[in-house]
Amino acid sequence: MQILTNPQELTAQCRQWHKDGETIALVPTMGYYHAGHESLMERGRQLGSKLVVSLFVNPTQFGPNEDLDAYPRDHERDAAIARSHGADLLFMPEAGSMYAKDHATWVEVPDMARGLCGASRPIHFRGVCTVVMKLFQLTQADVAVFGQKDWQQQAIIRRMVRDLNVPVRIETQPIVREADGLALSSRNVYMTAEERAQAPQLHKGLELARALARQGERNAGILRDAVLRYWAENLPLGRLDYLSVVDAESLEPLDTLNGRSLMACAVRMGKARLIDNILLED
Ligand code: PAF
């Protein structure tokens, strides 16, 4: 596995691979790998003849009071994991080589970035779209793999790729969970033991909504109230950021389930902000 930090060298290598008839799968990450990232790498390995993993804690997607400096990092361990999943290239740039001092160009999908996580993280998706677009340009990847835990992120990236005719296919991988149902996240390490013990109730609340939907409940408000009641009892350490029912593709809020409805949430548990989501219908 090659490790590159220089964006120009990444492009040169990817161009050469394309000339040689290889196809490139890209897995963009911010590191501190867990089994969720590993599943993205496994999928990437199947989809391209060359697998590029990027590891970059992208500063432009963090707000001024967010955890950019505290974001967990372990580059040595991450490199070993990427290697063990068959990555051909690990790209680990410095922020200065990704963003010029006078960087002034942004990619935005404002209509899809206003709700859900965007409501409390107003510049987040602009930073995500911009860095992901840069990675697509640098690698000319044929396919890129994202996780469904960040459902809003992958929906926005799909729209960006469609609207800007970016020649890359977007693949998404299911959420990987702990045995007790908690979605894996690099930020889970921020929780105390007590918070961690309650955290699986987040997903249990969403499962309750799906069970009610399967029994025929179509009213999004009723489903939402049922989850909030469940959390009030079983997740007392949680502070709600949002709980919404939206169209899974457009992310438009729904009053009534429409056949492809997603329930998504963010809840703060102490220092951790946990996100999760569930498709309410099959
Ligand atoms: O999901 C993430 O880890 C990041 O948002 C991404 C896609 C790597 C962009 O920085």
Image: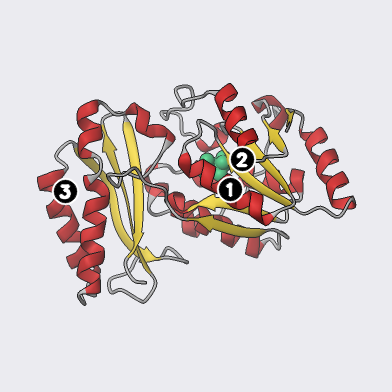
Q: Are marks 1 and 2 in contact (CB under 8 Å)?
A: yes
Residues marked 1 and 3 touching at CB (< 8 Å): no
Mark 1 Cα-neighbour bin, 10 Å: few <14, some 14–19, many ≥20: some
The circle drawn on residue 85 is 2
Which mark is on residue 42? 1
Label 3 environment density (alpha carbons within 10 Å; few <14, some 14–19, many ≥20): many
Q: Is residue 157 left or right of residue 181?
A: right
Q: SS for tag 1? A: helix
Q: Position of residue 11 (x, y in %)?
A: 81, 40
Marks 1 and 2, the one that precedes in the sequence: 1
Q: Is residue 111 visible?
A: yes
Dot placed on the residue nearer the N-terminal end, 1 or 3: 1
Left or right: 114, with 178 as reference point? right
Q: Secondary structure at mark 2?
A: loop
Residue 19: percent from left, percent from top: 90, 51
CA distance separating discs 2 and 3 = 38 Å
- The answer for how far apart the CA atoms under marks 1 and 3 are is 34 Å
Q: Residue at x 25, y 47 (%)?
A: 202
Amino acid type at circle 3 is Trp
Image quarter for ligand 1 equals: top right
The kind of residue tagged 2 is: His
> Do tag 2 and tag 3 residues touch (Cβ < 8 Å)?
no
Which of labels 2 and 3 is toward the front? 2
